[in-house]
Amino acid sequence: MQQEAAAVGTTNFKGMTLERHIREEERNHPGARGLFTRLVTQITLAAKIINAEVNKAGLVDILGLTGEVNVQGEEVQKLDEYANDVMRKALDHTGSVAALASEEMEDVYVIPGEYIEGGEYVVLYDPLDGSSNIDVNVSIGSIFSILRRKGESGPTELDDFLQPGVSQICAGYVIYGSSTMLVYTTGNGVDGFTLDPSVGEFFLSHPDIQIPERGKIYSINEGNSSKWDESTSRYITYLKEEDAESGRPYSGRYIGSLVADFHRNLLKGGIFLYPGDKKNPSGKLRLLYECNPMSFIVEQAGGAASDGHRRIMEIQPEKLHQRVPFIVGSKHDVADAIRFMSRGGN
Ligand code: AHG
Ligand code: MN
Ligand code: MN
């Protein structure tokens, strides 16, 4: 029998690419004219570039601190700065973006008029989330949020960024972990894409992500327990009590990268808390480029996000780098936490 010709490479075209998915999503946004697709495609390009650098961070001189301190008063890791530049360069020539805001830039970055064609969007991002984990090879990420400018014309200014989370038209994150994934929503559900490094393309791997209504994992930095408000302490104690009927005690898991802790809970269920405490009543995480995008995603996946009293996405921002207490995850778990926080925890 004639020898079968050897397979010449698999034609296993994996189906939906991220780029095709974005184009199809765009049809749900009347008035979007392909500019939105171009914008999100540029973000995925930035993700691929940052991913390449993250994957070899140990080899090139990109680890460690720059010796500078950013607007947050935090030491800037070189990869933060690199990722910030990659995101800015990927977005400042799309034509559809009028201005940018980043954790690593004190003020908004208004894109020069000559590079703007339409310019109806502004983008906020945390270019590298989980910086403290960069040089210990633990998963880190990037987070982004897209808003329409408030005004149709005139200069883009800070006020265009100070919009509540319900105004977001798109939000997403990239997690640079055992595989690199991009998870995003445009208000039509949540979809996850995994990067196939052999072809440099993101393929749909987690369609229509739904977070379990209740989980068995809680994620909080227990090292802060001496500073916790009474209600936080009571809630965490409650989660540790033995009660088979309500699935307690929960397991504690804390990676220290919001993107990684959030992604695990999104897929498995559970609750993440970075609450306000006696020392920092507003907590640590930033409303505009960490909490709002993650809240949009979790709500689209059937979960919830609160500052302990208010829905995160309804908070009217006052400052670009404003911090808020952040409680996010499975809806029944977040509801329990709010019950403790609003009634002083009984
Ligand atoms: P970033 O690296 O962008 O500053 O974010 C770090 C954040 C977040 O990723 C994580 O949930 C939190 O800091 C961890 O803070 P602690 O180390 O205080 O627990
Ligand atoms: Mn962050
Ligand atoms: Mn960051």
Image: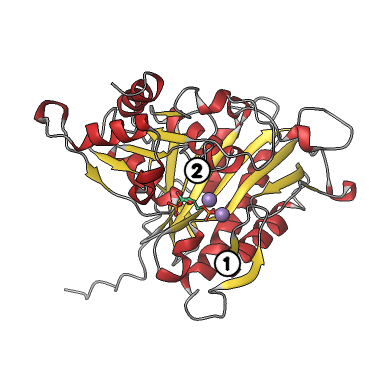
The residues bearing labels 1 and 2 have C-alpha atoms spaced at a distance of 29 Å
- Looking at the picture, does residue 21 appear above or below residue 140? above
Quadrant showing the C terminus: top left
* Residue plotted at (35% across, 20% down): 339
Choose top left, top right, bottom left or bottom right for residue 89: bottom right
For this orientation, the residue located farthest to the left is 244
The answer to whether the residues at label 1 and label 2 have Cβ atoms under 8 Å apart is no
What label does residue 279 carry, if any?
Answer: 2
Choose top left, top right, bottom left or bottom right for residue 220: top left
What label does residue 271 carry, if any?
Answer: none
* Residue plotted at (59% across, 42% down): 289
Amino acid at the residue labelled 2: Lys
* Residue bearing mark 1: 79
Quadrant showing the N terminus: bottom left
Q: Is residue 165 visible?
A: yes
* Residue plotted at (64% across, 42% down): 37
Left or right: 142 with respect to 38? left
What percent of the width, then of the height, locates residue 272? 37, 40
Amino acid at the residue labelled 1: Leu
What percent of the width, then of the height, locates residue 56? 48, 75
Of 106 and 172, which appears nearest the observer? 106
Of 157 and 223, which appears nearest the observer? 223
Left or right: 169 with respect to 14? right
- Looking at the picture, does residue 323 appear above or below residue 313? below
Disc 1, SS:
helix
* Residue plotted at (64% across, 25% down): 316
What percent of the width, then of the height, locates residue 192? 42, 44
